[in-house]
Amino acid sequence: MPVILHKLSEYQVSPGTEILILGTFIPDRSNAPDFFYGRERNFLWHLLPQCWGLDSLKDEPLSRKKEFMSAYNVDFADIVHSMDVPEGDELNTDDSFYDSHVSQWNDINTLIDKLPNLKAVYFTKKTFNGVPHMRAQVKNIADYCMQKEIRFCKLETPSKFYSPEKLQQWIDTIVLKNSCLRV
C-alpha cells in the first residue's frame, strides 16, 4: 500500500496561537485543498469568522484567511500525519476509512507544549461512531489539555452544510464559552 502524507506536513502553527482547531487529514494529492478546511463542502471559513460577527471568508484567498488567523490568534492542525492507502482508494475521505488506514498520527501534545499562549483546542467532529482509533487519539489530546488547564471541546463538523444552529453552537463554544461538547 502506498503511504500518503498530509499535504501540509511542513506547515508550522504560529507560536502565538491561542485557539487551535484540530481536524483529521488532507491527503497530499493534486485535487486536495491547499489549506485547512478548503474543500467545497466544508463551511469552516464561513462559520469561524461569523463567530465574531465578520463576513464569510469561504471564497476569499488564503492571504485574507491568514490575516483573520493572525488577528484572532487562531491556527490549525490535523491529527493524522500519514495514511496507508490501498490502490484505488486514494479518493476515499470517509472517517471510518481514515481511522483504519492511519500510518502515523501527529503528536498534537508536543505541539501543544510549543504554544505558550494556547487557551483552547477545538476538534471539528462531534461523534466517534466507527472511528475507535480517532476517538482514542482525541481522548488522549483532551486529557492532556485538561492536565495543562487548556479548554478542549468538540464542535459540530463544518462539513456538508451550514445552518444557523451550527453557527450558534460554534459561537456558544468558541466565543461565549458557555457550552462544551466533551470527548
Image (tube, rainbow, N blue to C red):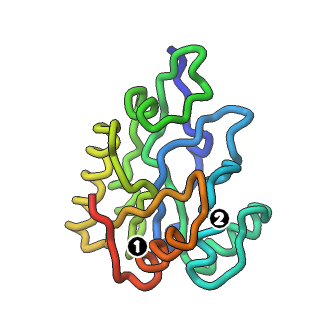
Q: Nearer the viewer, mark 1 or mark 2?
A: 2
Circle 1 packing at 10 Å, graded few (<14), some (14-19), many (20+), is many
The answer to whether 34 is drawn above or below residue 44 in the figure is above
Per the model, the C-alpha gap separating discs 1 and 2 is: 21 Å
Disc 1 to disc 2: CB gap under 8 Å:
no
Q: Residue at x 33, y 46 (%)?
A: 128
Residue 125 falls left or right of residue 130 = right
In which quadrant of the rendered view does residue 181 lie?
Answer: bottom left
Q: Residue at x 68, y 68 (%)?
A: 66
Instruction: Tell me which amino acid carries mark 1.
Output: Leu
Q: Nearer the viewer, residue 150 or 112?
A: 150
Residue 117: x %, y % from top left:
42, 76
Q: Residue at x 49, y 57 (%)?
A: 157
| Local SS, label 1 | loop
Q: Nearer the viewer, residue 167 or 26?
A: 167
Label whose residue precedes the other's in the sequence (1 or 2): 2
| Local SS, label 2 | helix
Residue 141 falls left or right of residue 106 = left
Residue 28: x %, y % from top left:
63, 35
The answer to whether 25 is drawn above or below residue 88 in the figure is below
Residue 145 falls left or right of residue 44 = left
Q: Quadrant of the C terminus?
A: bottom left
The numbered dot on residue 118 is 1
Residue 10: x %, y % from top left:
58, 46
Residue 100: x %, y % from top left:
38, 28
In which quadrant of the rendered view does residue 67 lie?
Answer: bottom right
Instruction: Tell me which amino acid carries mark 2.
Output: Trp
Circle 2 packing at 10 Å, graded few (<14), some (14-19), many (20+), is some
Q: Residue at x 47, y 82 (%)?
A: 175
The numbered dot on residue 22 is none
Q: Which residue is mark 2?
A: 45
